[in-house]
Amino acid sequence: MRTAPTGNDAPVSRNSRPVDVPTATRSTSPGWRDPRLWVGVVLVTGSVVAGARIMASADDTTAVWAAAGDLVVGQTLTTDDLTATRVRFADAADSNHYLAVDEQLPENLTLDRAIDSGELVPTSVLGAEADEDTVAVSIAVAPEHVPTGLVTGSHVDVWVVGEDRRSRKRAELVLDDIVIIDAPIVGDSFATSGSRQLVLAVPVTDEDALSQVLAASGDNLVRVVGRS
């Protein structure tokens, strides 16, 4: 009786080959001497620096004042007349030519020229602080005795026409370098009276001159001369 082969007696196929199994190795963390570690550090550092520069340049602007509306010559500036706007200047030094928001706005500051709404306020148009020792005086002057170009903020000389001892007409300079604080546009209301209204900032110390001008204004003896 034939029995099945067991154990080492099992037949071996002629086509079988031994299998090479690679030796298993454990993964290790790269050491500080590994150049790949330093390359990674350089890349991360470069990214952080580049990102910081981009963020800094994204808001490379300066806050300056712009006119909130049309501003006229001689107008006293207040924060209500202005609006803050941010501007990027090609040259940082150019920002010094404009009124900065972070600087305190001087009180009683006037304008030497008109500024349109939305226009940046340059420091070159800022005049001297208005004199607080003045009073507002309204006078009536014949239109032909007032230069047509006078506006609020204009500087004028005020003359009064009189007579000398020989009964000859002469003009006397009564007020010099006076600021016009209001100069309403001539309209129908002035056509009726036949005069032009001017509101002058007269120093309180010129009481005699003020009295003379007021008296002469009623007699149509006032002459107004514009100063350049």
Image (tube, rainbow, N blue to C red):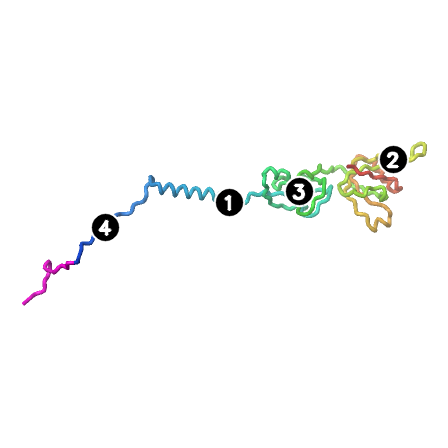
Q: Which SS does the magenta portion mostly show?
A: loop
- Residue farthest to the bottom, as pictured: 1
Disc nearest the viewer among 4 and 2: 4
Instruction: Of the two numbered discs 3 and 2 on the same chain, state the one appearing first in sequence.
Output: 3
Q: Nearer the viewer, residue 19 or 214?
A: 19
Q: Secondary structure at mark 1?
A: helix
Q: Give the amino acid type for the residue marked by disc 3 in the picture.
A: Val
Alpha carbons under labels 4 and 3: distance apart: 81 Å
Instruction: Of the two numbered discs 2 and 1 on the same chain, state the one appearing first in sequence.
Output: 1
37 vs 74, left or right, is: left
What is the quadrant of residue 75 in the picture? Answer: top right
Q: Residues within 10 Å of mark 3 (few under 14, many from 20)?
A: many
Alpha carbons under labels 2 and 1: distance apart: 69 Å
20 vs 67, left or right, is: left
The magenta stretch spans which residues? 1-14
Instruction: Of the two numbered discs 1 and 3 on the same chain, state the one appearing first in sequence.
Output: 1
168 vs 187, left or right, is: right
Would residue 13 be counted in the magenta stretch?
Answer: yes
Instruction: Of the two numbered discs 4 and 2 on the same chain, state the one appearing first in sequence.
Output: 4
Residue 67, image x, y percentages: 67, 45
Q: Give the amino acid type for the residue marked by disc 4 in the picture.
A: Pro
45 vs 198, left or right, is: left
Would residue 172 be counted in the magenta stretch?
Answer: no
Contact between labelled residues 1 and 2, with CB atoms less than 8 Å apart: no
- Which mark, by number, is residue 22? 4
Residue at the spot of label 2: 171
Q: Give the amino acid type for the residue marked by disc 1 in the picture.
A: Met
Residue at the spot of label 3: 121
- Report the residue at 9% width, 64% height from top: 4
Quadrant housing the C terminus: top right
